[in-house]
Image: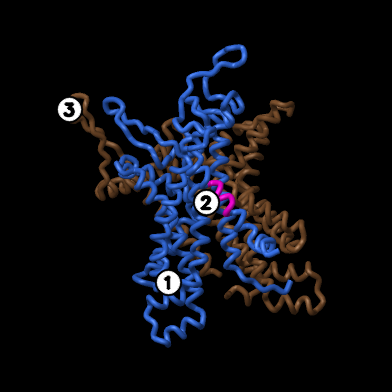
C-alpha cells in the first residue's frame, strides 16, 4: 500500500528517475552491449537480395541496421549510443559552469554589491529581446573564438555565459523573496553574520529551487546545442590547414549534434539520420524536464479552496 | 503610463545600440605569408579595429542614408521586407494562437484538475513542453513522407512556393509556447487557489466556472508578462524551423547573414524582430494597465 502511495505522490519523479537510469545505462553500459558496434566500422556498400550493391546511407531495417546508417555506412544506433557520453558531458558541464557563475552573481545582486543587480538586470533584459541562438551565433563566429586553440572550452564557456544573466536573476529573485520573510530578522537580531544568514536562513529555502533550475537548464542546453547544430555551429570541431592558406573546419567528434551536419540535405534524402539524432536529444530533454518537475513537486506544498 | 512607455522606448534604443555594437566587433581575417607554402591566419582583435569598424558603420549609414544595397544591386531594406512579410505569415498567427489557445487549455486543465480529462491535458502539456520543436518538425515530415509512400496524396512539404507551406512550420512553432502557457496558467491559477477571495466567492454560492473567471483576472498580469517570452521563443526557433522546412524567410536569412559576416543585412533583418518584441512589450503594458484590477498591480 505504501508503495502505491509513494507512486501516486511522486509518480513524475519516479518516471524521471527511471528515464534517467535508462539514459545513463545507454551512455555507460550501452557501448559494451553486443548489438552495438563500438568500433563504428565504415561500410562502403552492402548488397541487396539480387546482389546489387547499395551505397550508404542505408535505410533502417536493411540487414543489421536497425535505425539505418550514416553517410559513411556506420550503424546509426551504435553512433548514437557511442556519442551519448560526449554529448551528456558537454551539456552537464555547461550547466554546471553556468550555475557556478550564477550563484555568486545572484547572491551579490541580492546584496546589491557594486551594482551587480543592475548588471544582471541588463544582461537578462537584453536576452529577453535578442534570442539566445542569435547571441551565440554572433559571438561564436568572432575570430578569437572561432580560431582559438581552445575553441571547445571557449564555446562551452560562451554558451554557459549567455544565459548566466537569466539564471542569476532568478536566483536573486528567490533570495530576495526568502530574505523578505520575518524569520530572517530573528537571525539578524540574534547576531548572525551574513555567511551564517545565507547558510542557515536562506539556503534551506532556495536550494530546492536551484536544483530544479539546474536540471531544467540541462534540457535547455541540449535544445540550444541541437539548434546550433542546424545552423552549423558545433562545439567540438577543430580548425586545420588543409592546403596552402586554406583552412577547413574538421569534425571528428561523434556527439549527437554532429549528426545534423548534413541535416539540410538529409531531410530530403535520408531523413532517418536527423530524425533519430533529434530523437535522442528529445529523449534527453524529456528526461530532464520530467525529472525537474518531479523534484519540484517534492518541494511544493500548496493549500487550496477550490 | 506615459513614463512606462518612455522607459520601454529607452530600453528598446539601448538594446538596439547594444546589438549594433555586438554586430560590429571586428571579424576580419588576415592571411600572412611566412615563407613558401607557409601561411598563417591571423585575426587581429584590437580596440582600434573596433573603433574603426564603428566609424565605418556610421559613415556608411550617413552616405547611404539607410542600409545601402546588396551586391546584386537591390536595396537591402526592401529585400529584408520581402523576407519579413513571408515570416510574418508565421509569426503573427503563431503568437496570437499560442497565447489564446495556451491560456484556454490551461484554464480547462484547472477546471478539470481532479478528473481524468485534466490529467490527460497535464500529461500532454508536459510532454510537448519537453519536446524540442525541431524534433517535432522532423517527425511530422517523416510521418508525411511515410504516409505519402503509402498512398497519401502528394503535396509539397518543403519550400515557400505554395500557399499552404507555412502551416507545418507554424504548427511546429506553436506547440512549445502553448505547452509553456498551459503550464504557466496552471501555476498562476494554483497560486490564486489558496486566496481568501476564492473561498468568499464559493461561500456566496458562485459556481466553479465563475470562481475561475475571478481567478483569471487576478492572474492576468503574470500571464501577460509571458507574452514577451512567447514571442522571444517564437523568434528564436523561427530561423531553425525556416531552415529545416526550406521556408526562405527573415529568420533564416538573418542567421545566414550573421554567419556570412554581412553586418548590414543582419542589422536590416534584426531590427524588425527587435521592433516586434518592442510592440509586444508595449501592448502587454497597455493591456495590463487596462484590464488588471488596480489593487493587484502592485503585487
Expressed as whole percent of the image width and height from the top left, the position of residue B230 reads 58, 54
- Residue at x 31%, y 45% (from the top left corner): B53
Q: Which residues are magenta?
A: A17-23
**Discs 1, 2: same chain:** yes
Which chain, by letter, is brown?
Answer: B
Give how far apart the Cα atoms at labels 1 and 3 are: 57 Å
Give how far apart the Cα atoms at labels 3 and 2 are: 49 Å
Evaluate whether residue B79 shows in this view: no
Residue B35 appears in which quarter of the rendering?
top left
SS label for mark 1: helix
Q: Check the image and name the residue furthest to the left.
A: B35
SS label for mark 3: strand
> Residue B81: within the magenta?
no
Residue carrying label 3: B35
Residue carrying label 2: A219
**Discs 1, 3: same chain:** no
The hue in which chain A appears in the rendered picture of the protein? blue
Amino acid at each position: 500500500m505504501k508503495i502505491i502511495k509513494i507512486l501516486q505522490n511522486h509518480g513524475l519523479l519516479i518516471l524521471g528517475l527511471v528515464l534517467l537510469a535508462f539514459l545513463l545505462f545507454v551512455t555507460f553500459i550501452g557501448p559494451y552491449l553486443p548489438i552495438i558496434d563500438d568500433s563504428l566500422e565504415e561500410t562502403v556498400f552492402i548488397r541487396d537480395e539480387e546482389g546489387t550493391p547499395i551505397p550508404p546511407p542505408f535505410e533502417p531495417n536493411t540487414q543489421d541496421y536497425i535505425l539505418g546508417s550514416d553517410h559513411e555506412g556506420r550503424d546509426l544506433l551504435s553512433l548514437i549510443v557511442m556519442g551519448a557520453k560526449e554529448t551528456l558531458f558537454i551539456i552537464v558541464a555547461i550547466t554546471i559552469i553556468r550555475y557556478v557563475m550564477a550563484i555568486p552573481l545572484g547572491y551579490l545582486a541580492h546584496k546589491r554589491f557594486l551594482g551587480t543587480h543592475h548588471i544582471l538586470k541588463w544582461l537578462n533584459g537584453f536576452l529577453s529581446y535578442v534570442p539566445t541562438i542569435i547571441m551565440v551565433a554572433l559571438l561564436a563566429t568572432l575570430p578569437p573564438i572561432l580560431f582559438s586553440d581552445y575553441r571547445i572550452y571557449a564555446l562551452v564557456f560562451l554558451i554557459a555565459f549567455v544565459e548566466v544573466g537569466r539564471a542569476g536573476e532568478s536566483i536573486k529573485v528567490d533570495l530576495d523573496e526568502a530574505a523578505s520573510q520575518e524569520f530572517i530578522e530573528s537571525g539578524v537580531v540574534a547576531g548572525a553574520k551574513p555567511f551564517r544568514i545565507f547558510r542557515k536562513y536562506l539556503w534551506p529555502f532556495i536550494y530546492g529551487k536551484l536544483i530544479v533550475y539546474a536540471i531544467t537548464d540541462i534540457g535547455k542546453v541540449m535544445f540550444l546545442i541541437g539548434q546550433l547544430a542546424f545552423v552549423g555551429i558545433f562545439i567540438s570541431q577543430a580548425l586545420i590547414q588543409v592546403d596552402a592558406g586554406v583552412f577547413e573546419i574538421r569534425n571528428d567528434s561523434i556527439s549527437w549534434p554532429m549528426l545534423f551536419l548534413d541535416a539540410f540535405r538529409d531531410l530530403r534524402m535520408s531523413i532517418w539520420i536527423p530524425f533519430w539524432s533529434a530523437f535522442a536529444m528529445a529523449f534527453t530533454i524529456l528526461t530532464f524536464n520530467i525529472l525537474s518537475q518531479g523534484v519540484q513537486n517534492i518541494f511544493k506544498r500548496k493549500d487550496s479552496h477550490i | 503610463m506615459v513614463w512606462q512607455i518612455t522607459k520601454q522606448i529607452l530600453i528598446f534604443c539601448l538594446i538596439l545600440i547594444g546589438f549594433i555594437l555586438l554586430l560590429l566587433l571586428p571579424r576580419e581575417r588576415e592571411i600572412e605569408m611566412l615563407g613558401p607554402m607557409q601561411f598563417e591566419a591571423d585575426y587581429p582583435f584590437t580596440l582600434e579595429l573596433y573603433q574603426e569598424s564603428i566609424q565605418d558603420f556610421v559613415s556608411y549609414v550617413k552616405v547611404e542614408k539607410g542600409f545601402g544595397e546588396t551586391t546584386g544591386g537591390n536595396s537591402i531594406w526592401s529585400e529584408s521586407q520581402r523576407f519579413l512579410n513571408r515570416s510574418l505569415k508565421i509569426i503573427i498567427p503563431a503568437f496570437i494562437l499560442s497565447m489564446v489557445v495556451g491560456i484556454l487549455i490551461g484554464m480547462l486543465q484547472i477546471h478539470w484538475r481532479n478528473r481524468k480529462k485534466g490529467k490527460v491535458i497535464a500529461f500532454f502539456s508536459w510532454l510537448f513542453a519537453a519536446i524540442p520543436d525541431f524534433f517535432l518538425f522532423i517527425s511530422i515530415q517523416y510521418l508525411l513522407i511515410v504516409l505519402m509512400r503509402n498512398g497519401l496524396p502528394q503535396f509539397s512539404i518543403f519550400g515557400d512556393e505554395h500557399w499552404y507551406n507555412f502551416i507545418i512550420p507554424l504548427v511546429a512553432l506553436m506547440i512549445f509556447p502553448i505547452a509553456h502557457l498551459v503550464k504557466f496558467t496552471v501555476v498562476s491559477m494554483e497560486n490564486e487557489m489558496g486566496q481568501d477571495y476564492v473561498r468568499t466567492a464559493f461561500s456566496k454560492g458562485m459556481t466553479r466556472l465563475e470562481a475561475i473567471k475571478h481567478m483569471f483576472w487576478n492572474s492576468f498580469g503574470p500571464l501577460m508578462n509571458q507574452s514577451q517570452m512567447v514571442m522571444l521563443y517564437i523568434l528564436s526557433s523561427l530561423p531553425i524551423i525556416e531552415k529545416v522546412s526550406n521556408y526562405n524567410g527573415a529568420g533564416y536569412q538573418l542567421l545566414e547573414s550573421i554567419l556570412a559576416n554581412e553586418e548590414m543585412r543582419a542589422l536590416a533583418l534584426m531590427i524588425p524582430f527587435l521592433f516586434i518584441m518592442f510592440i509586444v512589450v508595449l501592448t502587454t503594458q497597455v493591456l495590463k494597465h487596462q484590464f488588471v484590477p488596480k489593487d493587484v498591480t502592485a503585487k
